[in-house]
Image (tube, rainbow, N blue to C red):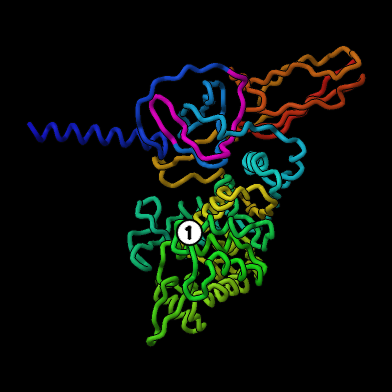
C-alpha cells in the first residue's frame, strides 16, 4: 500500500514539473485572479526584467521581450504572448515596460535587412534609439556553413538534442555539439534580443563606457577588487590595456569574466618548472587550463598584469585586426577564406553568454543606451528562424511569427472621399479570414498625398504575425 501511495506522489510531482516546463522557466503557484479593465491593444517591451504572474504561473521575462497588452489592473498591464502556439497570459508591472511606437523614419535604416530580421530590430531601436545596425552580407549558404562549424563546436550540454555523441572530447564535460544546436546559435536572428544583441557590437574602444560599468560587470566574481601584485583593480588593468590596443573594454571584461570569473587556473596561476604563470583569457588552453599555463610560460606572463596586457594584445592582433570585430565573428570566422581556422572559442554558446555578461553590465550602470554600432550577418538562403533544439525547454514566449504576408489580407475602406480642406484619413479595416487585425499590433497605418484633391495613399506595414508592405489609393474630389 505504501508503494502505491509513493507512486502517486511521484506522478503528481512529474505532472507539476511538466506544467512548469510548458510555461517556461517560471514556478507554478496559485494566485487570486485579478480583474482586467480593457484598454486599447498595444505592444509593450520589457525594459527591466520582471515576472509575469497569473493565477497559475510565474514566468521571468528577459530584457526586450515583447507582449501584447489589452487590459490594466492598478499598476500592472494584462498581457499575453505565445509559447508553442499556446496563449500565455498574466500581468506585468507597468513601470518595467515600454509601450512600443512604430518609427517610420527608422525603416530606411533596416531596408537592406530581410523581413525576418526587421521586427526585432524595430524593438531594439525603440529601446535603444542610439544604436546603429548594419547588415553584413555573407556570401555563404546558411545550412552549409552550419555543417562546417559543427565539426569543431563543443558544448557542456548533455541532452541528446544538443550533442552529436555522448563521448567527451575535451576536459571533463565538453562534447561535440549537435548540428541543431550549431544552427540555432549561428542564426543571427536568435540573438536579436536586447539581452544578447551586443554579440554583434563592434569591438572598438568606446570612450562613453565608464570604469563603473566594468566594475559592475565584474562584481561578484574573482575579478572583483584589486590585483594583489599591482595594487590596481582588475577593472583598471583591463581599461588601460583596452585603451592601449583600441579594443572594446566591455567586450574584454565580459570575456575575462566568462573565462575566469569563478577564479580559474589562469587567474590563480599555475607553475611550470617551479615558476608561476597566469593566463586570464585562457589563450592556448585548447586541451584544458593546464595547456593555457604552458602557453603563458612561453609568453613569460609572470604577473596578472602581463597576462591581461598580453591577452588583450593577442585578441587584438589575432582577431580584431583580421576583421573579426564582434563576439559573433570571433566564434564564426565568416570573413576568412577558409572557415573554422581562426575561432577564439570552441564552446558554441560562449559568444551569447559573454554578450549577456556585457549587457548586464550596461544595464546595471545605466549605459545600455549610449551609441553602439552593431554589424549583423545576413546569409544566402536563410531558412525560417531556427528554433531551440529542446522543444520542451524553450522559454522564448513570442508574439513574432511573421508567418503571414500582408498582401494576402483583405483591406476594406471607402475609395472615394470628399475634399474638405483638411487631411483625409479613411477608416481602414484589415481582415485575415475571420480575424480582424489590430492596428499597431498586426500592422502600422499611415497616409500620404491626402491633403489636396487627387489620389491619396494608404501605406500599410506588417508587424509581428504579419510581414510586407501594401499601398492602397483613394480618390479625393
| Quarter of the rendering occupied by the C terminus | top right
Residue 45 located within the stretch drawn in magenta: yes
Please identify the dominant SS of the magenta region: strand
User: Picture coordinates of residue 119 (x, y %)?
Assistant: 64, 39
Tell me if residue 356 comes above or below residue 171 in the rendering. above
Residue visible at 48% across and 59% down in the picture:
348
Tell me if residue 281 comes above or below residue 138 in the rendering. below
- Front-lying residue, 163 or 311: 311
User: Picture coordinates of residue 271 (x, y %)?
Assistant: 39, 81
Q: Where is mark 1, residue-wise?
A: 348
Left or right placement of residue 121 versus residue 291 in this view: right
* SS label for mark 1: loop
Q: Quadrant of residue 333?
A: bottom right
Task: Point out the residue furthest to the bottom here.
Answer: 273
Residue 344 located within the stretch drawn in magenta: no
Task: Point out the residue furthest to the left here.
Answer: 1
User: Picture coordinates of residue 198 (x, y %)?
Assistant: 60, 53
Disc 1: CA contacts within 10 A as few (<14), some (14-19) or many (>=20): many
- Front-lying residue, 164 or 346: 346
- Front-lying residue, 141 or 40: 40
Tell me if residue 254 comes above or below residue 451 in the rendering. below
Residue 40 in sight in this render: yes
Residue visible at 38% across and 63% down in the picture:
174
| Quarter of the rendering occupied by the N terminus | top left
Tell me if residue 266 comes above or below residue 78 in the rendering. below
Question: Magenta segment range?
Answer: 39-59
User: Picture coordinates of residue 10 (x, y %)?
Assistant: 21, 36
Counting labels gives: 1
Residue 151 in sight in this render: no
- Front-lying residue, 181 or 366: 366
Amino acid at each position: 500500500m505504501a508503494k502505491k501511495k509513493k507512486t502517486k506522489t511521484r506522478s503528481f510531482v512529474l505532472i507539476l514539473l511538466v506544467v512548469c516546463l510548458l510555461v517556461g522557466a517560471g514556478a507554478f503557484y496559485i494566485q487570486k485572479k485579478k480583474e482586467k479593465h480593457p484598454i486599447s491593444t498595444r505592444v509593450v517591451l520589457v525594459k527591466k526584467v520582471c515576472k509575469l504572474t497569473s493565477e497559475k504561473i510565474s514566468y521571468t521575462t528577459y530584457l526586450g521581450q515583447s507582449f501584447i497588452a489589452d487590459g490594466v489592473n492598478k499598476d500592472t498591464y494584462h498581457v499575453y504572448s505565445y509559447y508553442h502556439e499556446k496563449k500565455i497570459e498574466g500581468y506585468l508591472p507597468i513601470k518595467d515596460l515600454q509601450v512600443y511606437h512604430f518609427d517610420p523614419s527608422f525603416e530606411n535604416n533596416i531596408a537592406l535587412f530581410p523581413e525576418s530580421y526587421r521586427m526585432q530590430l524595430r524593438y531594439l531601436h525603440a529601446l535603444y534609439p542610439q544604436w546603429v545596425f548594419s547588415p553584413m552580407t555573407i556570401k555563404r549558404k546558411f545550412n552549409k556553413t552550419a555543417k562546417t562549424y559543427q565539426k569543431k563546436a563543443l558544448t557542456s550540454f548533455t541532452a541528446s538534442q544538443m550533442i552529436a555523441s555522448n563521448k567527451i572530447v575535451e576536459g571533463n564535460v565538453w562534447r561535440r555539439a549537435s548540428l541543431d544546436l550549431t544552427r540555432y546559435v549561428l542564426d543571427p536572428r536568435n540573438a536579436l534580443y536586447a539581452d544578447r544583441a551586443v554579440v554583434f557590437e563592434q569591438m572598438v574602444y568606446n570612450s562613453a563606457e565608464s570604469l563603473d560599468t566594468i566594475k559592475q560587470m565584474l562584481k561578484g566574481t574573482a575579478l572583483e577588487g584589486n590585483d594583489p601584485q599591482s595594487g590596481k583593480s582588475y577593472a583598471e588593468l583591463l581599461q588601460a590595456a583596452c585603451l592601449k590596443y583600441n579594443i572594446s573594454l566591455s567586450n574584454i571584461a565580459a570575456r575575462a569574466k566568462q573565462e575566469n570569473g569563478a577564479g580559474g587556473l589562469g587567474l590563480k596561476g599555475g607553475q611550470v618548472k617551479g615558476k608561476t604563470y597566469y593566463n586570464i583569457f585562457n589563450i592556448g588552453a585548447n586541451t584544458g587550463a593546464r595547456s593555457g599555463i604552458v602557453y603563458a610560460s612561453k609568453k613569460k606572463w609572470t604577473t596578472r598584469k602581463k597576462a591581461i596586457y598580453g591577452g588583450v594584445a593577442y585578441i587584438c592582433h589575432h582577431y580584431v585586426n583580421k576583421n573579426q570585430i564582434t563576439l559573433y565573428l570571433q566564434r564564426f570566422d565568416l570573413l576568412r577564406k577558409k572557415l573554422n581556422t581562426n575561432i577564439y572559442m570552441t564552446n558554441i554558446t560562449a559568444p551569447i553568454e559573454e554578450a549577456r555578461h556585457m549587457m548586464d553590465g550596461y544595464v546595471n550602470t545605466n549605459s545600455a543606451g549610449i551609441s553602439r554600432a552593431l554589424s549583423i550577418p545576413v546569409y544566402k538562403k536563410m531558412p525560417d528562424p531556427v528554433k531551440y533544439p529542446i522543444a520542451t525547454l524553450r522559454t522564448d514566449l513570442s508574439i513574432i511569427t511573421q508567418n503571414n504576408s500582408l498582401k494576402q489580407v483583405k483591406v476594406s475602406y471607402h475609395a472615394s472621399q470628399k475634399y474638405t480642406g483638411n487631411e483625409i484619413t479613411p477608416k481602414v479595416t484589415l481582415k485575415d479570414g475571420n480575424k480582424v487585425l489590430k492596428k499597431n499590433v498586426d500592422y502600422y497605418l499611415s497616409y500620404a498625398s491626402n491633403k489636396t484633391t487627387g489620389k491619396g495613399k494608404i501605406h500599410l506595414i506588417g508587424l509581428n504575425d504579419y510581414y510586407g508592405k501594401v499601398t492602397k489609393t483613394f480618390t479625393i474630389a
